[in-house]
Image (cartoon, rainbow, N blue to C red):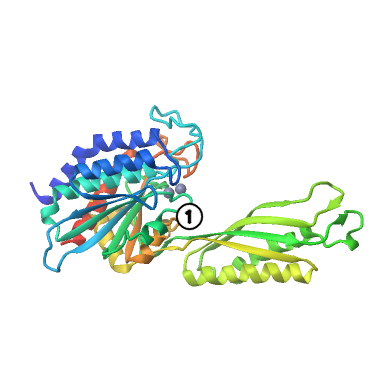
């Protein structure tokens, strides 16, 4: 049997086990940094394959190392990353393997990511004699709170690694398709907390007060001009104020108003500029109106930016897996969502790509983080094949 057919048939053989694994993980979701059961399963399975396993990395992360042959150029190392955490959502699907834990759900597909990477480990272990280098399997905790990747990098998960790849299953992207492009793919995400301070008083005598609600209203409106007037129409970015709290009664002007929001952008430079301008605009407007504004910017994660050569590697693997017609590299691949895969991509050149799981016929049509979210499980072997081919190519 030619190697290409053998890979497909090896993956096909694993499908029943993959579906069982994914459903088991789905039934037992665990939140960020609480992935005890999940990481035990991962570590056990990697050990069973004979890999060198390090658990407890960044609390609940796991790293497995597969040593291949040293090969001609001294043996490079590729890392493949999956995230393992679930969300604090009460699942509302009717599927028989729905979450057994009240208020917790795999509503982002990370159960699928973990399953895919375990299968890739299995397939590559069977082929280790053909690999001229090593593969690091990186299972990270706490992606949903943007907390797991950075400590894994600090604890050495990317040491000795020459390239990193990973995927996200995407629910509004058609089943059967794979999206990959170089440059930015997922946005940066930063949290904003603006506290406007004025001077409280009687609502009927505004001239004796400094009204923080009116000041906040101007700030919200002005922040939008950072997108509409100061950002090129060709550079996507988002500023959303999603929560405003102020006041206690209809006849009292409060002392303070608090606003919470998020900022997304696709390049490091643009991110820095917008964060600086948010601060300038908010403090300037509040000051000009007699009040003040404390601006707290809570750095989330940088944008996910793909390396050109690593993208080509994944692109070729995707074409081999699903055919040229089903591989996208246009705007449909971009998301204003964020992912802390960005931390790994900042540490070494890499490529993060998307795999479609949308299939309304199977009920897989709800957005990520929705209580009825589900995936088309037939996408699992597609993810396995693209990652496996890319890793094998990298280590040829
Ligand atoms: Zn998510
Ligand atoms: Zn996710």
Q: Quadrant of residue 221?
A: bottom right
The relative height of residue 80 versus residue 110 in the rendered view (above or below) is below
Residue visible at 70% across and 56% down in the picture:
258
Residue visible at 29% across and 33% down in the picture:
20
Residue visible at 17% across and 56% down in the picture:
67
**Residue 306 in view (yes/no):** no
Q: Position of residue 68 (x, y in %)?
A: 15, 56
Q: Is residue 137 left or right of residue 127?
A: right
Q: Is residue 203 left or right of residue 325?
A: right
Q: Quadrant of the C terminus?
A: bottom left
Q: Answer yes or no: disc 1 within 8 Å of ligand 1.
A: yes
Q: Which residue is mark 1?
A: 337
Q: Position of residue 332 (x, y in %)?
A: 42, 56
How many numbered dots are placed on residues in this image?
1
The relative height of residue 244 versus residue 23 in the rendered view (above or below) is below
Q: Position of residue 338 (x, y in %)?
A: 46, 56
Q: Position of residue 257 (x, y in %)?
A: 73, 56
Q: Residues within 10 Å of mark 1 (few under 14, many from 20)?
A: few
Residue visible at 82% across and 61% down in the picture:
199
């Amino acid at each position: 049997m030619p190697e290409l057919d053998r890979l497909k048939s090896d993956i096909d053989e694993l499908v029943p086990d993959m579906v069982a694994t994914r459903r088991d993980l789905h039934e037992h979701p665990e939140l960020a940094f609480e992935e005890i059961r999940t990481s035990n399963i991962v570590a056990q399975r990697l050990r069973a394959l004979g890999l060198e396993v390090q658990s407890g990395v960044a609390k609940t992360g796991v790293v497995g190392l597969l040593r291949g042959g040293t090969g001609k150029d001294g043996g490079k190392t590729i890392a493949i990353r999956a995230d393992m955490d679930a969300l604090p959502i009460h699942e509302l699907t009717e599927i028989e393997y729905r979450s057994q834990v009240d208020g917790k759900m795999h509503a982002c597909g990370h159960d699928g990511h973990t399953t895919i990477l375990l299968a890739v480990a299995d397939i590559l272990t069977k082929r280790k004699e053909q690999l001229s280098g090593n593969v690091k399997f990186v299972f990270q905790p706490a992606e949903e709170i943007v907390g797991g990747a950075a400590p894994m990098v600090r604890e050495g998960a990317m040491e000795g690694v020459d390239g990193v790849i990973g995927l996200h299953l995407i629910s509004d992207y058609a089943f059967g398709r794979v999206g990959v492009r170089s440059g930015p793919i997922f946005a940066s995400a930063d949290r904003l907390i603006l506290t406007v301070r004025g001077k409280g008083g009687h609502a009927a005598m505004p001239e004796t007060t400094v009204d923080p609600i009116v000041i906040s209203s101007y700030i919200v409106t002005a922040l939008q001009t950072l997108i509409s007037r100061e950002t090129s129409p060709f550079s996507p970015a988002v500023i959303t104020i999603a929560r405003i709290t102020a006041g206690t009664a209809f006849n009292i002007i409060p002392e303070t108003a608090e606003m919470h929001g998020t900022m997304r952008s696709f390049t490091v430079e643009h991110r820095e500029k917008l964060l600086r301008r948010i601060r300038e605009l908010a403090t300037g407007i509040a000051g000009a109106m007699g009040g003040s504004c404390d601006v707290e910017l809570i750095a989330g994660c940088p944008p996910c930016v793909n390396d050109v050569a690593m993208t080509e590697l994944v692109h070729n693997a995707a074409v081999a897996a699903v055919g040229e017609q089903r591989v996208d590299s246009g705007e449909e691949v971009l998301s204003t969502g964020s992912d802390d895969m960005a931390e790994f991509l900042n540490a070494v050149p890499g490529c993060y790509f998307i795999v479609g799981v949308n299939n309304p016929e199977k009920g897989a049509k709800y957005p990520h983080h929705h209580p009825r979210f589900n995936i088309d499980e037939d996408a699992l072997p597609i993810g396995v094949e693209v990652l496996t081919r890319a890793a094998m190519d990298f280590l040829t």
